Image (cartoon, rainbow, N blue to C red):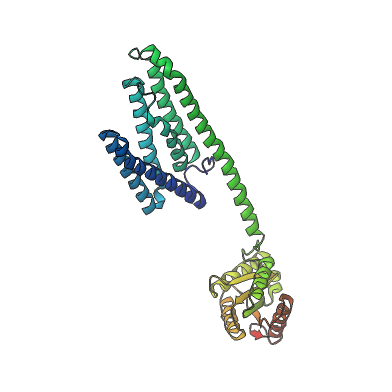
Amino acid sequence: MFWSPRRTTSQAPHEQKFRHAALTAILFSSLATSVFAVLVAFPIGWSVVDQIGLFVLAVKNLFFLLWLRRFPRHTALVGGLYFLILSGAGVWKLARSLLFEQAANGLGIYSYWLPLAYIVAFLAFPGRVALGASASLLAVLTGVGVAFGLSDQIPLDVKRDQSALLVQVFLAHVTFISFFVLFGVLQDRYVTAISEAESEARTAYLDPLTGAPNRRRLMQGLAAGLERQEPLTVILFDLDHFKRVNDTFGHDAGDEVLRGTVAAGMAALRRDTLLGRWGGEEFLVVLPSTRLADGAVVAERLRLSVAEVVYGPGLHVTASFGVAEALPGEDVSGLLRRADEALYASKAAGRNQVRAA
C-alpha cells in the first residue's frame, strides 16, 4: 500500500480506503494536538505570535479534515497539499533556526514534527512518487544544514555545538524514509498474497466455463438453508437434447448455450438468488424462504426465459424443470432426490415443462 511498484497511477479500492482512513486519523490527531496547544498556550505564557500561529494551525488542520471527510476521493489532493505545507513550514523553520537565529535555540521545536511530512507523503502518494517527494524534502533540509555549516556568519562554536545534533536528525530522517519504503514493500506483498488467496478461494466456488456457482457452492447454500429450518425450495433443471447441440453445432456452440442459460436464468431471478451449474447441462436454483407453489412459479418464469434465447440459425434450446420443497427433518440428499424425480417426470411428460414433487 505504501509502496506499490506495479500501481503508480491507480489504486485498488481497499488501498484507497486504507489511505483515506490513515490520512483522516493523522489529520484528526494533528487537529487535537493543535487545539490542545492553543488551550495551554495562554496559561503557559507563550507569545502572542505563537498563540496566533497555533490558532492558524488548528484552523488549517480542521479545514483539511473537513475537506477529506466531505470528499473521500480527494485523498491524494488533500494529502499532497498537506505535505507541501508541512514541508514548506519545516524547511522555513529549520532555515530560520540555523541561518537567521544561528541556532540560538537549537534546531527549533518544529524540527520534532518534520518526520510527519514523510508519513503524509507515503499515505497520499503511490510508492515511487512518495519516495521522490520525501527524498526531495530531505535534500532541501540537507541543503539548509550544509548552508549552516559553510556560513561565515555563524560562529564556529555554534556550528560545533549543533553539528552532531543536526547529523543525528538527518540520519533519523533517512531511517524514517527507509522504514516506510521497506514497510510498504512488505505490506504490498502481503496484500498481494491475500488478494491472490481470496481470488483462488472465490474461483474454487465458481464454474470455470459459465462463471456461475459450482456444485460445491450450491451444496454450501443448501446446507445453510436447511440449517435455518425455514421453508426451502430447489429447482433442478436440465437442458433438453443438449447432446444433439454438441453433435450438430460443435462444442463451442454448446459452451455458448451453457453460458447463455446462466445469463437467461439470472435475468429471470432476483439478484441475490443462488443459481449454479450442478454438472454437465444440469443447473440448480436454491430458493430460501420459498414454498413449493411459489417455487413452481419461479421455475415457469425460468423456463420461459431459457426458451426465449436464440443462439443462431436453427439453434434453440429448451429445458425441463423439477421443483421440490424441503420436508421437515429432510437432508440435502433427500431433497435433491425428489427434485431429480420431478425433473425426470418433466422429461417423461414431453420436456420443456415444470413438474413439482
For the residue pair 238 and 49, the one nearer the viewer reads as 49
What residue is shown at x 69% (from left), y 87% (from top)? 349
| Residue 16, image x, y percentages | 47, 49
Q: How many marks?
A: 0
Q: Is residue 34 visible?
A: yes
Q: Residue farthest to the front? A: 43
Quadrant the C terminus occupies: bottom right
| Residue 75, image x, y percentages | 41, 47
What residue is shown at x 40% (from left), y 45% (from top)? 27
| Residue 259, image x, y percentages | 61, 67
Q: Picture quarter containing residue 61?
A: top left
For the residue pair 162 and 5, the one nearer the viewer reads as 162
- Determine whether 166 is above or below 17 in the image: above
- Determine whether 257 is above or below 291 in the image: above
In the image, is 89 to the left or to the right of 124? left
For the residue pair 145 and 72, the one nearer the viewer reads as 145
Q: Residue farthest to the bottom? A: 349
| Residue 44, image x, y percentages | 32, 36
For the residue pair 215 and 2, the one nearer the viewer reads as 2
Q: Residue farthest to the left? A: 48
What residue is shown at x 39% (from left), y 38% (from top)? 83
Q: Picture quarter containing residue 292?
A: bottom right
- Determine whether 301 is above or below 123 in the image: below
Q: Is residue 76 visible?
A: no
- Determine whether 295 is above or below 313 in the image: below
